[in-house]
Amino acid sequence: MSRFLRPAARLAATASARSAVAPRALPRFASATLSVSQRRTFADAKGGKEYTVREALNEAMAEELEQNDKVFLLGEEVAQYNGAYKITKGLLDRFGDKRVIDTPITESGFTGLAVGAALAGLAPVCEFMTFNFAMQAIDQIVNSAAKTLYMSGGIQPCNVTFRGPNGFASGVGAQHSQDYSAWYGSIPGLKVVAPWSAEDAKGLLKAAIRDPNPVCVLENELMYGVSFPMSEAAQKDDFVLPFGKAKIERQGKDLTMVSLSRTVGQCMVAAEALKKKYGVEVEVINLRSVKPLDVESIVKSVKKTGHLISVESGFPFAGMGAEILALTMEYAFDYLHAPAQRITGAEVPTPYAQGLEQMSFPTEALIEQYAAKLLRV
Amino acid sequence: MFSRALRVPRTAAPLVRARPAAAARPATFRPAAFGALRTVTTDAASAHAEAVPDADDQPFQVTLSDESFETYEIDPPAYTVDVTKKELKQMYYDMVVVRQMEMAADRLYKEKKIRGFCHLSTGQEAVAVGIEHALTKEDDVITAYRCHGFALMRGGSIRSIIGELLGRREGIAYGKGGSMHMFTKGFYGGNGIVGAQVPVGAGLAFAHKYLGKKNAAVILYGDGASNQGQVFEAFNMAKLWNLPALFGCENNKYGMGTAANRSSALTDYYKRGQYIPGLKVNGMDVLAVKAAVKYGKEWTVAENGPLVLEYVTYRYGGHSMSDPGTTYRTREEIQRMRSTNDPIAGLKQKILEWSVCKEDELKSIDKEARKHVNEEVAIAEAMAVPEATPQILYEDIYVRGTEPQFMRGRTPEENYYYKA
């Protein structure tokens, strides 16, 4: 861990010497992690296939259920209804009702139950219909799941995976649109990932299920139906992505855009537009993992571009953007040619009316315009 | 106080009826009323009346079916209700209007004019209407997201409700809330998180007691929500502090796509207060609902503590607009409820049978209701959307005049500074 605490200059100098930290006493996970190339690009020309994020998540769970009989799914409507958003479609038929379990609408209760099963050595995947409902259960996630290993002096691990849609969805109002990345990201003991593409979704969810710690997989409802190319490697049943490792979705030399989840796609569109209009090359970093956060990739990129914008859809106060900017200050201040900036969701409970809603979340146009301003182009 | 000792015939019968499975198969243990077995009738036209007067506002007595209620540790309400012709016609009009409004919402949603979630109460009209006819405007109602009918009955206008669904500035929540969040005097939403409204409702009851008012809080939740832990936390406080709270489970048989017996270990929702008396009501019969709530209010306002009601009802449509509602139940079941237990058709049948009015007059009530809804919908559709300005976006996050100096926008340039 000490590598995260080194000053930026030394960090950058030693970047090439780093190696992934393998969790102890988990050979399967460690070897799988290391076998995956860390600079994955879009699908290979041969064997490439389109997957929706929904299909990728479904396949991830199916494979893990197949490979490890300790894995089971529980949540509201996951079995007979095939999932409120159809992520668990077909899994009940395939694995039976011992392993795919419909719960009552009792988030605090079934989350606690999942945590208990994990303490006893099982590997539950606990679906929240949305992370907005996980607020009913956040005490179990934070106090029961995240802290137990530490409180037991390392005796009692808790291999539970919490997953479900998080953040902005369309037209569902204030109680169903909140982004919890920063909430869960702030908890020591939790790991938190936020996939954008289908490969992200599959690789991160599988890694989450295999990881011996409690992990929150923060998906996004609006991404479920979006198709992405899936490389041959990612279609295999041993495909996992490492935590704490961001992916450079687009190489660039003029500006670093750090983003996560759905806003990565918006950054890609804005980056393309900035290239067309102004000829500037934006580097887009897909964080993939909120905790641990890949500071090295950010520092390396800033060293190259000298400019940074973070783009996220959560509330600004003490949010993901605030964290990314603070880390940039701590580790990359000397490389910046201009103050780092953040684009966030607006500080307002999400309004229902469409015109107002649009003002509350980052848009491609806003990202483009704000980046152009930062670069003075 | 306890009905079992006092009213042997009426309360003993349901207990016997509730255990046919156990009786038939003594070797296998099955809890009482397991499965979809429901012992209160859902016949919407089971009441009868004699000696109906000519005058529109002269009260007369209606006798409810003796399968209208089931009780737990309490005497049932009187099986006779005093009504007037005028009130019956008003109840009929109210239910027709609620249904017409929900059908308009259904149409607007399918025309893609309504966004996000939209949960309709078609089939459950007798609950919202029956409750309102038993309350005064000083009583309170709180419910979850299937809230349009309650918002209307509590005094919201159709135009403001439809306007809200359409995201208009003149909507009931000024376009900020949407389908799930509606508030008006004596109506506290319109809440989006399953079960969270129940302890909040206990708070409404607490306030009545605190302020020394002789009013009740009617707190609604579904059969799915009834299992949430905080429901039981609210029960405990309400009983402990003797709050005037009428907890009420709208049991429409399915919490989303999960049948009641797949989510609840005890499907007798009226018994789930354990130490709180319960009353199960035929929720398809508006008169039974009215009688039960009126009785409940008198009971709880007389400082007898809370009650747990169960309104046995049925939702014709899916859970929300994205749920076709046919994967977890048969089309025949829906069709059977619609054709034989419909609350509107049931009351209509009674009105005609009791010669409250002629069929022509009912037809003109139908027509008037439809016309009113159409006009209101047209007005709502003509309403302007909220202007997409920072001033409107950031208004009402805090009480006006007490805001922080500014709220942060998506970028610092979009920060909104409140004018002092």
Image (tube, coloured by chain):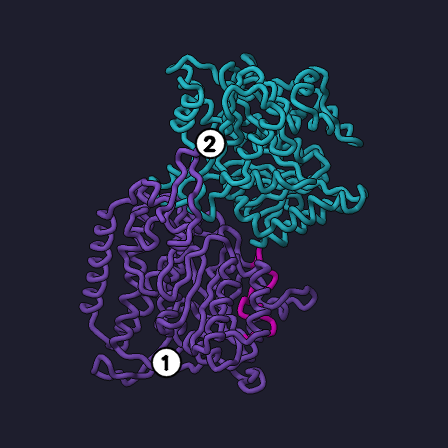
Chain colours: A cyan, B purple
Foreground mark, 2 or 1, reads: 2
Can you say whether B315 is above or below A342 in the image? below
The reply to whether the magenta stretch includes residue A262 is no
Q: Return the chain for callout 1.
A: B
Residue type for callout 1: Val
Q: Main secondary structure of the magenta part?
A: loop
Label 2–label 1 contact, CB within 8 A: no
Residue at x-position 41% and y-position 27%: A364
> Is residue B32 rendered to the left or right of residue B304?
right
As rendered, which of B79 and A165 lies closer to the eye? A165
Residue type for callout 2: Ile
Q: Return the chain for callout 2.
A: A
Residue B259, which numbered label? none
Residue on which the image places disc 2: A343
Q: State the CA–CA distance, disc 2 to disc 1.
A: 62 Å
Q: Quadrant of residue A232?
A: top right
> Is residue A188 rendered to the left or right of residue A181?
right
Q: Is residue A253 visible?
A: yes
The reply to whether the magenta stretch includes residue B275 is yes
Residue stretch in magenta: B261-277
As rendered, which of B182 and B232 lies closer to the eye? B182
Residue on which the image places disc 1: B81
Q: Secondary structure at mark 1?
A: strand
